[in-house]
Amino acid sequence: MSLLPMTEIVSSENTQPESSLYSHDLAPIPPAARTWTTWNYAALWVSMSLCIPTYMLASSLIEGGMNWWQAIGTIFLGNTIVLAPMVLNGHAGAKYGIPFPVLARASFGVRLANLPAVLRAIVACGWFGIQTWIGGFALYQMWKVWSPGIEQWPRIFPASFGLETGPALTFFLFWLLNMFIIWLGVETIRKLLVFKAIFLPLAALALLFWAIDAGNGLGPILSQPSKFETNAAFWDFFFPALTGMVGFWATLSLNIPDFTRYATSQQAQVTGQVIGLPPSMTLFSFIGVVVTSATVIIYGEMIWDPLVLAGKFESKMLVSVAMICVAISTLATNIAANIVGPANDFSNLSPTRINFRMGGYITGIFGVLIFPWKLVADPSGYIFTWLIAYSSLLGPIGGIMIADYYFVRNKQLITNDLYSSSGIYSYQNGYNMKALWALLAGIVPNIPGFLVTIHVLSQEAFPSFISGLYHYAWFVGFGVSFAVYLVLMKNEKRA
């Protein structure tokens, strides 16, 4: 008897799903259970876009030298570009009801598919660390207004860590709170998500109106000029920044089938994402741009971190309420967006040894080891070290998956074979080495620039055009892996 729902069976002869590749969570969603409409997808993107990192994304561009319309245009363009792989990868989810790890089996093989899943999980671990730092720093800001002496606590970490004692303590406390929620189970987070959905839009609008009022209207705020003295200087910043904007949602552009598998139709997922992603990201980013530009007028300096800005408010009660709300909403976002996925990915590596809780704890440990406080300490770290770096890993995966689904398979998959080690997607013992070579081909061109960016090697170590490829990391990785995979798979047996 087949393990798959009868409405979803499309099988090779004598091929049956195997329990080691199948679970209730990985099984295709039958058409009757697909209930997400256009507005569900639009609401999903509005909810995910309304977060502190989105605000920091926009304000980092202002801090980097752009004026308001350059920053907004870069963000809109980046999100319009990433919308393409989002919709393309979402097609298989909506058509076959399968999640990302299962779709990856078609191109990478039923066993090698663990590689892109783990790479995606590691990136989610990084986002977990960043969100945990944001939540912990919110607690620090609240503590500081009531007890300013916390700033003078003696340093317990080496200076190279870049971590003061007070923020380190609140970061660790907030990290423990996240670990406690994992121990309780993700069901406890649902009410917090509702709180976030209500609070963050109101808080964002309140911050916008404050900036307009304190900055003497939108006119002076939006008249702040670009810092780039030449067109060449602007373009040198623009292209890496654009890559960073694309990289911001590079993870979701891969695992979007996890959501589109619930779509009532292809039109629902396409239209919902089109009206939900670029507009909501652009609108919330505009708030970040306006507020960041206003800080120059109000305080005489540019403050790109909203938590640092909130800490400057005179009312202790106002700061406390704002920071508690930020911490709670960040906690909700962190568990929902950055724990559930990687915890399941790690658990999938060894289901008998790693349960959901253990997978969550692994995520938490990796989230600390990336030193998230350094990534968000300045715009260059946030954009050039974090967003661009991981886009160089995820871009090639996206290129391979899209090349396979649209050009090798012509959007036709044998569903049962995705759950079998003896079907068409088993390749060589479950490994499609051609996909691995294509993946490496897309990653390698970006390695020199990455090593230069993190100062492992000097600028003179490589010709400038080689290290400069890193500024276009997602595009280079996507394009190279896409092309190499198509060439290698030219004579491969198709579904």
Image (cartoon, rainbow, N blue to C red):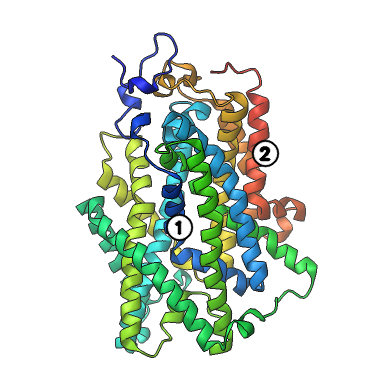
Q: Nearer the viewer, residue 440 or 296?
A: 296
Please report the residue visible at 51 percent of the width from the left and 82 percent of the height from the top: 211
Residue type beneath disc 2: Val
Q: Earlier in the sequence, mark 2 or mark 1?
A: 1
Please report the residue visible at 56 percent of the width from the left and 29 percent of the height from the top: 405
Q: Residue 395: x and y, percent?
A: 58, 44
Q: Quadrant of the N terminus?
A: top left
Please report the residue visible at 37 percent of the width from the left and 84 percent of the height from the top: 151
User: Does any portion of residue 185 appear in the rendered image?
Assistant: yes
User: Does any portion of residue 330 appear in the rendered image?
Assistant: no
Residue underneath mark 1: 46
Q: Residue 110: x and y, percent?
A: 44, 26
Residue underneath mark 2: 480
**Horizontal arrangement in the rendering, residue 365 relative to residue 274 (left or right):** left
Q: Residue 122: x and y, percent?
A: 44, 48
Decide: is 445 above or below 416. below
Residue type beneath disc 1: Val
**For residue 394, what is the image quadrant?**
top right
**Horizontal arrangement in the rendering, residue 419 relative to residue 473 (left or right):** left
Q: Nearer the viewer, residue 142 or 384?
A: 142
Decide: is 474 above or below 317. above
Q: Residue 377: x and y, percent?
A: 50, 71
Which label was assigned to residue 175? Answer: none
Distance between the Cα atoms at labels 2 and 1?
Answer: 32 Å
State the SS at label 1.
helix
**Horizontal arrangement in the rendering, residue 444 relative to residue 114 (left or right):** right
Q: Nearer the viewer, residue 48 or 390?
A: 48
Q: Which class describes the residues within 10 Å of circle 2: few (<14), some (14-19), or many (20+)?
A: many
Q: Nearer the viewer, mark 2 or mark 1?
A: 1
State the SS at label 2.
helix
Q: Which class describes the residues within 10 Å of circle 1: few (<14), some (14-19), or many (20+)?
A: many
